[in-house]
Structures are given as C-alpha cells and as structure tokens.
Amino acid sequence: MCFAGDADAWSKEFLELCREVGAAASAGIPLDGFRRLVDCGTQSLLFCSDCADDDLRELIVSLQRPAPEPSAVAARLKRVVIVPGNGCTNVRRSNWYGWLAGQLEAAGVEVGIRNMPDPMTARESLWLPFIVRELAGGEKRLRETIVVGHSSGATASMRLAETHRVGGIVLVAAYTSDLGDLNERASGYFSRPWQWEKQKENAGFIVQFASTDDPFLPLEEQRKVRDGLAPVIEYLEFDKRSHFFSAPFWELVEVLERELGVAI
C-alpha cells in the first residue's frame, strides 16, 4: 500500500517480509503472517511497519472489486515457444526447458519445444526461420505466441522481434555482444547494431531475467539489454541464480500465468 520504491526495491522488501513471517516467497504471505505485519509491524523497520485503519479499509474495498477481464493481449496469447541456449542437443532434458514445458502442457497451454538445428553454434540464419515455421507454426501464429529465450535463445528472440510481430518475449540471461567468444561471433547475432525500437514496436511485451552472479555474462552486459529496451521492458534482477540453469523456475511461471491469463 503506497510503496514508494521501484519494482526491484519491492522485490527485495517482499522477500524480507516473507522471511520475517517464515513464508516462502513463491507461496506468498499467509493470513496469519499478514495479521502479524498489520498488528506488530516488522523487526527490520521495513516500509510495512505500520498500517493505518484507512489503509486497510482501502485494501478491503479493492479486494472486493470484481476481477478484471483478461487484457486484450492475454486474450489473444495462445502458445509458448521455448528457445534454448546453444549446446543443448536434447532440449527437453536440458536446464528447465522440459520442466517448464510440462507445467504449461498440464495447464492446457500449447508449447513449441524441439531440438534445434545447429545446436552448438545456434546460427541466426538457421534458428530464426526454425522458430517461426517449426516452433510457432508460421508468422500469423507467432503474433499469438510468447517466445521464451534462454542465453543464445534470448539473443535469437531479440533478433526475431526486430523483423517479426510476436505476442511477447521473455529473455532469460540475455546479452548484447559476443564477449570475445569465436563461437558466439559465428552465430551471426552480433554482426550489426541492435534495433531496440523495432523490438519494442513488434513485441507485445518484454520481460528480462538477469542474475548478478552469472558466470558467463557480466551484469553490465545484461543491463545493456534492459537499457536498450527501456522503458517498456520489465526487468527482474536476482542474486545467486547463476545462468538460470535449474528448475524449478517459478518466477518465470508467474510471468507466463499473468500474460496468458491462465493458472499454471
């Protein structure tokens, strides 16, 4: 209620609130924990240290309002495409890709996930047509598709959005240069300037996941993506998530739930 900070500040504050009441951030603060915060405030002098009666009345009124209808964007988004990083010869068994596909499929969401051509170098000339034709099912269906790209898949997703209308893109461990790696240079993604305005124009929404301790990508490299796609990008920065290798990845699921308008 009336939090004055930005999204990053609130994420940190919420995690601290969950720790104070012994709740998992993925599950949220339970009712008894909420009562403790309202009645007693917090030990660490966070923003939520006192709740006035008027604040609580306003919260109750807002919760009693009818739930909004799904947005026009959510209503038309029908599928999710998962674009892996390079080096993945069996995509469903790599990182969190198969886990995410299973979560989505169990919720009735159509998923495009397949082994990619040229998996080691991930050449743009091969990957972008494959994403459009084989994963999304054509340019028309791409407009109804959320493209989730990880690492090399994130760079592919950004280049895709420069030339194609896409329902939305989710960038996990994204970067802007080859960082001196010859294999990355051979992929073709870094041979020219990024067309940030085209990406913002063509993507229905853009979300980026970054980690402060990524062993491959300096944080400033990840933040270049954020800065290029500002102000439309939703930027989510975490600590101790490495290169986002592991499942579960519930924060990603939460983004997809919101954008698809379904419970996963």
Image (cartoon, grey):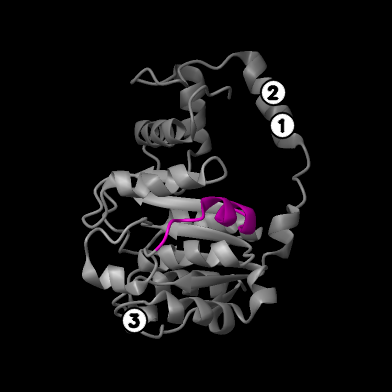
> Which tag, 2 or 3, sits closer to the chain's start?
2
- Residue drawn at 57 percent across, 44 percent down: 232
Work out whether residue 54 or residue 188 is closer to the camera in this orientation and state it.
Answer: 188
Identify the image quadrant of residue 66.
top right
Residue at numbered disc 2: 58
Task: Please report the residue visible at 58 percent of the width from the left and 22 percent of the height from the top.
Answer: 2
Q: Is residue 199 magenta?
A: yes
Classify residue 142 as left or right of residue 128.
right
Instruction: Residue 119: give its label.
Output: 3
Q: Which mark is residue 62?
A: 1
Task: Please tell me which of labels 3 and 1 falls first in the chain.
Answer: 1
Q: CA distance from mark 2 to mark 1?
A: 6 Å
Report x, y in % for residue 162.
55, 62
Left or right, 145 with reference to 113: right
Callout 3 amino acid: Pro
Q: Position of residue 181 (x, y in %)?
A: 22, 65
Closer to the observer: label 3 or label 1? 3
Callout 3 secondary element = loop
- Please give the name of the residue rendered at 62% of the width and 65% of the height, measured from the top-left corner: 166
Mark 3–mark 1 distance (CA, rounded to whole Å): 49 Å
Q: Are marks 2 and 1 in contact (CB under 8 Å)?
A: yes
Q: Which mark is residue 11?
A: none
Name the image quarter holding the N terminus: top right
Label 1: how many Cα within 10 Å (few below 14, some 14–19, many 20+): few
39, 113: nearer the viewer: 113
Give how far across and how far down residue 17 sits, in percent.
41, 31
Whether tag 2 and tag 3 are in contact, CB under 8 A, the answer is no
